[in-house]
């Protein structure tokens, strides 16, 4: 959308409506980029949080397995 508006702005440099719409399209693109970055950061955080939980559970399971091995010996 921004590219189209840039082309239109070049074609009609004195049109204030085109300038306004161009500015709005730039703001919309920036907002979209920020939203995407925020969503990615949130997803990365959730992945790390879940990995941490799985590591804790794996450690507990390993401890229990070690206890069972000691009893078996």
Image (cartoon, rainbow, N blue to C red):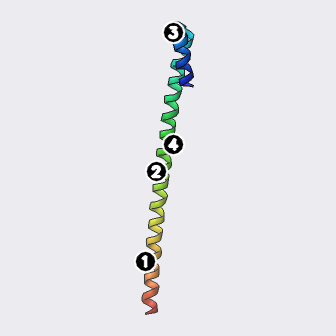
Residue carrying label 1: 63
- Residue underneath mark 3: 13
Do tag 4 and tag 3 residues touch (Cβ < 8 Å)?
Answer: no
Disc with the residue nearer the chain's start (1 vs 4): 4
Mark 2 element type = helix
Q: Which mark is nearer the camera, 1 or 2?
A: 2
Q: Is residue 70 left or right of residue 1?
A: left
User: Mark 1 or mark 4: which is in front?
Assistant: 4
Disc 2 vs disc 4: Cβ atoms closer than 8 Å?
no
First in sequence: mark 1 vs mark 2: 2
Between 35 and 17, the one nearer to me in the picture: 17
From the image, which quarter does the C terminus lie in?
A: bottom left
Disc sitting over residue 39 in the figure? 4
Near-viewer residue (63 or 13): 13
Q: Secondary structure at mark 1?
A: helix
Q: Quadrant of residue 18?
A: top right
Q: Residue furthest top?
A: 14
Of pointers 2 and 4, the one earlier in the residue sequence: 4
Dot 2 and dot 3 residues touching (CB under 8 Å): no
Distance from the alpha carbon under mark 1 to that under mark 2: 27 Å
x and y, in percent, of residue 56 in the image: 44, 67
Q: Identify the mark nearer the N-term, 4 or 3.
A: 3
Marks 4 and 3 sit apart, C-alpha to C-alpha, by 36 Å
Tell me the element at label 4: helix
Measure how far apart labels 3 and 1 are at the Cα level. 72 Å
Compared with 64, 27 (above or below) is: above
Residue to which mark 2 is pinned: 45
**How far across and down, in percent of the image, does residue 17 sit?**
57, 11
Identify the residue at horizontal 43%, vertical 82% (top origin). 66
Q: Are marks 1 and 4 in contact (CB under 8 Å)?
A: no
């Amino acid at each position: 959308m921004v590219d189209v508006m840039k082309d239109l702005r070049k074609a009609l440099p004195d049109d204030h409506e085109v300038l306004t719409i161009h500015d709005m399209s730039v703001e919309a693109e920036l907002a979209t980029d920020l939203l995407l970055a925020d969503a990615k950061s949130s997803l990365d955080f959730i992945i790390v949080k879940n990995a941490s939980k799985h590591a804790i559970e794996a450690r507990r399971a390993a401890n229990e397995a070690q206890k069972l091995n000691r009893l078996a010996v």
